[in-house]
Amino acid sequence: MYWDKDIETMSRERLDALQLMKLKDSLQKASSSCYYKKLFEKTGFSPDHVMSLSDMGKIPFTTKDDLREHWPYGFLAVPKTELVRMHSSSGTTGRATVIFHTAADIDAWADIVARSMYSTGMRKHDVFQNMMTYGLFTGGLGFHYGAERLGALVIPAGAGNSRRQIRIMRDFETTIIHIIPSYALHLYSIFEESGVDPKTDTKLRIAFIGAEPHSVRTRDKIEALYGLKAFNSYGLSEMNGPGVAFECEAQAGMHIWEDHFFIEIIDPETMQPVPDGEEGELVMTTLMREGMPLLRYRTGDVTRIVAQPCSCGRSHKRIERIKGRTDDMMIIKGVNIFPVQVEKILMDIPGVGMNFLIILEREGYDDVMHIKVEVRRDLFTGNVKQLESLRRRIVEELKSDILITPKVELVEHDSLFRSEGKAVRVIDNRKE
Ligand code: AMP
Ligand code: ZN
């Protein structure tokens, strides 16, 4: 049931002791990087100020801007000759950040990805089709090496070319896919067009979905359409990429591997930690990284810690599905809304199709939220009254949840722009 029982089910006391030991080691390693050396000198911080995990607050934060300003090599803690791989973020918000790995980093990374996959029930006999972009983006190679480590047969299909993906799935009897959730919904329409039913005409049993915020409703929809179990996979390039946090078979929050990462949830305004269970920004410290250790890295991702122990027996803390990034939050007429809140409502309404787009406009002094919603294929050709009542229902349900009355336009199935990678959910035309 476990990939590494001793580590995964370790008692809190042992885990704390292990984290403290590794944290001290990480601080030492970090202090040989150009960036942290200068920062420690400037702030008067020294690694020996940390005697226990409760001293965490003494360590300065690291931000994406710090990574950008010291791009590309300022954070290296080892000579360049020790590096074997570079990756970068997908650059959804500004210039892409780069991360460097030593051979030991790559090895450790493959191990936690394998551990994550194993916790969902993936085994050596599985055929794994990785439908993520290979290259600088971590979702390709990160999953690839993890699946090989687990011993599964890996098909490095890469992203895009939907019909080919379906053909590969059928020809080689793929049992597990790794796919971006918004793309999984789109791909289903290609299945429909091809007259192939993923439930009966493929051997799919598991999907790993992640890389972008998605609601539990979207997960349910993917599970129902494909007839499989979909597990949420969270990661960010700054912390390797995939394998940071993953849902286990219980599908109730994602375990963060605490032997590799120390996590805190902070209030992004006060920058103080919030109690377990309260929502805030996820902050992470690498505990194993050699090439580029990062201390108290502000991920920008909003989540909370699930306080109760998990039924699977793993002791590593769980986080709730990511609500969004602090910089994705829309402020409309003073109300804070994450795109995933809109998605959750939409995906629960029968008749709504696979995609939507939020467009924010300023009309006079007012913020207006337009939402284009794709409608199910069979409905669009249907009668006008039916469509109008669907449109009204969408407006009402959104209004009662997000307290904003959006202008909703129903559009044809598969008519909205779809990015190759992470979905673009919002266009904000309010900014001059
Ligand atoms: P990148 O570094 O380009 O791989 O992007 C990492 C970012 O993608 C994270 O900081 C999150 O904002 C987002 N992300 C990754 N996995 C998930 C997930 N499972 N749910 C929600 N957002 C995710
Ligand atoms: Zn669990």
Image (cartoon, rainbow, N blue to C red):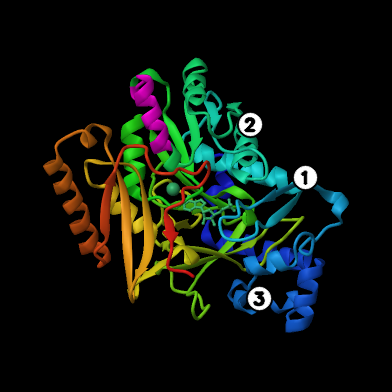
Residue most toward the front? 364
Residue type at mark 3: give it: Ile
Dot 3: element: loop
Asked whether residue 288 is in view, the answer is: no
Mark number displayed over residue 103: 1
Q: Is residue 81 left or right of residue 187?
A: right
Asked whether residue 40 is in view, the answer is: yes
Kindly identify the residue that appears in the image at 43 percent across and 32 percent down.
206
Q: Nearer the viewer, residue 341 or 293?
A: 341
Residue most toward the left? 385
Highlighted magenta segment, given as a residue range: 184-199
Dot 2: element: helix
Distance in Å between CA atoms under marks 3 and 2:
37 Å
Distance in Å between CA atoms under marks 1 and 3:
27 Å
Dot 1: element: helix
Tell whether label 2 touches label 1 (CB within 8 Å). Answer: no
Distance in Å between CA atoms under marks 1 and 2:
16 Å
Q: Is residue 287 magenta?
A: no
Residue type at mark 1: give it: Ala
Residue most toward the top? 171
User: Where residue 249 sits in the image (x, y, percent)?
Assistant: 42, 41
Residue indicated by mark 3: 59
User: Where residue 311 sits in the image (x, y, percent)?
Assistant: 38, 48
Q: Is residue 399 left or right of residue 344?
A: left
Q: Is residue 24 left or right of residue 189?
A: right
Residue indicated by mark 2: 148
Compare marks 1 and 2 and give the one earlier in the sequence: 1
